[in-house]
Image (cartoon, grey):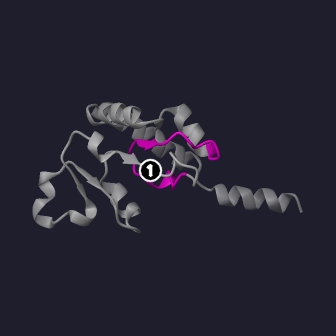
């Protein structure tokens, strides 16, 4: 998919402090740093949704008020289905839809901001889920 991005890209593993300004897209290829990086992102592509292994954590980037792009296999994740309906997430089915949707977001700051706000609001509105579940279970005893 990297070849579909018509901007200067670099893998995180190849990034040096001296050349950061030369790239507008950084592709994270390192483990354990995503939650730290999402705070600086304008858009997130969350992997795992094109295959059968399962979608990676989509709520991590959503909390940082950014739009999220995912693959087509998300049906096991009700929160993702809801965020797609709300128009905070975009689902892609192939390389062409990825390219089209990514370029559309890169070219439209207002859309990115609107989608990011939808995602953030969803997270805020659903805070305390653990407390609600525990309360419900206690009532059923």
Rendered residue at 12%/54% (across/down)? 21
Q: Position of residue 33 (x, y in %)?
A: 37, 66
Rendered residue at 15%/58% (across/down)? 20
Examine the rendered structure and indicate whether residue 51 appears above or below residue 92: below
Q: Residue furthest right?
A: 141
Judge from the rendering whether residue 45 lies leftward or rightward of residue 126; answer left or right: left
Total numbered badges shown on the rendered structure: 1
Judge from the rendering whether residue 57 lies leftward or rightward of residue 43; answer left or right: right
Quarter of the image for residue 114 reads top left
Quarter of the figure with the N terminus: top left
Quarter of the figure with the C terminus: bottom right
Examine the rendered structure and indicate whether residue 13 appears above or below residue 5: below
Q: Residue furthest bottom?
A: 32
- Residue highlighted by disc 1: 46
Quarter of the image for residue 94 reads top left
In the rendered structure, does residue 68 fall within the stretch colored magenta? yes
Local crowd size for mark 1, using a 10 Å CA cut-off: few (<14), some (14–19), many (≥20): some
Prevailing secondary structure of the magenta residues: loop
Q: Position of residue 60 (x, y in %)?
A: 47, 55
What kind of element bears circle 1?
Answer: loop
- Nearest to the observer: residue 111 or residue 22: 22
Rendered residue at 65%/55% (across/down)? 129
Q: Position of residue 54 (x, y in %)?
A: 57, 53
Q: Magenta span covers which residues?
A: 55-78
Q: Residue furthest left?
A: 18
Judge from the rendering whether residue 7 lies leftward or rightward of residue 121; answer left or right: left
In the rendered structure, does residue 32 fall within the stretch colored magenta? no
Examine the rendered structure and indicate whether residue 128 appears above or below residue 91: below
Rendered residue at 28%/34% (across/down)? 109
Quarter of the image for residue 39 reads bottom left
């Amino acid at each position: 998919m990297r070849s579909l991005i018509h901007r200067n890209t670099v893998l995180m593993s190849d990034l040096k402090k001296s050349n950061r300004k030369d790239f507008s897209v950084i592709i994270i290829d390192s483990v354990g740093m995503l939650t730290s990086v999402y705070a600086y992102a304008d858009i997130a592509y969350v992997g795992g949704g094109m295959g059968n292994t399962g979608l990676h954590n989509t709520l991590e980037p959503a909390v940082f008020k950014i739009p999220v792009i995912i693959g087509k296999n998300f049906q096991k994740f009700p929160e993702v289905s809801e965020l797609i309906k709300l128009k905070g997430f975009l689902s892609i089915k192939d390389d062409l839809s990825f390219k089209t949707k990514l370029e559309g977001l890169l070219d439209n700051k207002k859309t990115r901001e609107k989608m990011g706000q939808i995602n953030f609001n969803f997270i805020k509105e659903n805070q305390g889920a653990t407390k609600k579940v525990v309360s419900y279970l206690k009532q059923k005893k």
